[in-house]
Image (cartoon, helix red, strand yellow):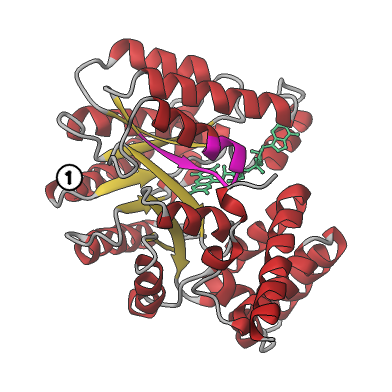
Amino acid sequence: MDTIFSNTKDAFSIKTDFELLRAHFLFKIIQNKFLVKIGALIINIALKFHLPIIPIVKLTVFDHFCGGVSEKDCNSIIKKMYNKNVCSVLDFSTEGFKNEIEFDKCLNKKLSIIDFIKDRKDIPFAVFKPTCLGREVLFKKISSNQKLELKEVEEWKRIKNRFNDVCSKAFQNNVKILIDAEEVSVQKAIDDLALKMMIRFNKKKAIVYNTIQMYRWDRIDYINNILSKNSDIILGFKLVRGAYMEKEREISNTLKIKSPICNDKASTDLNFNLAIDLVFKNLDRISFVCGSHNEFSILKILNMMSEKNIKKNDDKIWFGQLYGMSDNISFNLGIKGYNIFKILPYGPVRNLIPYLIRRAEENTSVRGQTGRELQLILDERKRRRLEKN
Ligand SMILES: Cc1cc2nc3c(=O)[nH]c(=O)nc-3n(C[C@H](O)[C@H](O)[C@H](O)COP(=O)(O)OP(=O)(O)OC[C@H]3O[C@@H](n4cnc5c(N)ncnc54)[C@H](O)[C@@H]3O)c2cc1C
């Protein structure tokens, strides 16, 4: 299919020949499920035995999928992308935070990022993963209506306060903030907190955005339910398909319960499209981010925007992709003037390894997407060779 996303010259305009060659090599490996499994295993063993794997990871997958080790490190990429009208969303790695001291540390980091990005047009959103602010088990208990022990009641209060602190700081600094969605077992607690934050801070415009995973068959009802009740606020939604499908299926198989995930990809796609229709019907009450690498979904939104005469840079509609993936979408949207950002993960290399392994596994499980990615890289390398000759 030839679309605006097939233009590889603009898509890879900030990538050097070396970076393109590295991307080619990486996606070739990622395409192979067996190599991804072996690679992940080798990295985990090397880490366990303190073998010097970090520099190799840094030069290869890390530099392709991450912005750097610190905010300062990310600045040159942020600048290069913004020159092409592609914004960044800084996502500090918070995997594996486990105790109250670390949750507070994480909170402070998120607050300091809001300070770092306020008034910056090149970084339009802050983002956080809810379970980096408190123990996952508490989110699970609240989500499944289990009674908390006395000291857990206090702990949950602290989690709620951390949520409020991040969202309130975002509100005070007029920074939009995305709340990531996680596994179904913790999501009800996240949804309820996110809605509370929206009711508190989204009176005039969307500051707080909750993420809705459309691979869940119950989410259209969920959106309708929220819409039926909250007519006095602007809802902020980040629509995604969902990242934990395999894990969710495993859990429901083990527990012998109905899976919360749509039966097949076509049903997820249909659900995603229905959500887009629903959002567009209610654009006076919703601002949204489409977090997707799916060209059809994005084309659908572009068509709807044009049909409804919505300005390309209307702040109500943003597109987002992950850094290191689908540059053909991000940069071609940027050049045409749409609101677009890349999620730019950053932090110590070691902390980002689980994220990197997830990216590789996810790309392996979506073979069509990796094939498309690889083909575009090949096309661009060929185009550059021809241009040089
Ligand atoms: C900016 C951004 C933010 C994100 N934030 C989050 C987040 O907060 N939480 C989160 O969970 N994910 C998040 N994701 C990941 C997202 O949910 C998807 O996993 C990823 O983007 C792939 O989906 P797609 O729409 O890009 O592409 P596609 O290739 O069209 O779709 C792949 C997705 O379809 C679904 N799918 C695939 N096969 C099947 C099947 N057999 N049955 C049912 N469904 C199937 C899965 O969700 C799979 O990830 C984010 C992605 C982006 C780009």
Residue 268 on the magenta span: no
- SS at mark 1 in the image: helix
Q: Most extreme residue toward the top, as rendered? A: 228
State the image coordinates of residue 84 (x, y, percent, origin top left): 39, 65
State the image coordinates of residue 73 (x, y, percent, origin top left): 39, 80
Number of labels in the image equals 1
Horizontal side, residue 289 vs residue 15: left or right? left
Residue 291 on the magenta span: yes
Q: Is residue 261 visible?
A: no
Q: Most extreme residue toward the left, as rendered? A: 172
144 or 302: which is nearer to us? Answer: 302
193 or 220: which is nearer to us? Answer: 220
The answer to whether 22 is drawn above or below residue 354 in the figure is: below
Q: What residue is at 24 percent from the left and 40 percent from the top? A: 207
Magenta range: 288-299
- The image quadrant where one finds the C terminus is bottom right
Q: What residue is at 74 percent from the left and 24 percent from the top? A: 263
Q: Which residue is mark 1?
A: 171
57 or 317: which is nearer to us? Answer: 317
Tell which quarter ligand 1 is in.
Answer: top right
State the image coordinates of residue 356 (x, y, percent, origin top left): 62, 65
Q: What residue is at 36 percent from the left and 25 percent from the top? A: 308
State the image coordinates of residue 267 (x, y, percent, origin top left): 69, 24
Locate residue 228: give its quadrant. Answer: top left
Q: What residue is at 29 percent from the left and 44 percent from the top? A: 163
Horizontal side, residue 176 vs residue 277: left or right? left
Kind of residue at badge 1: Phe
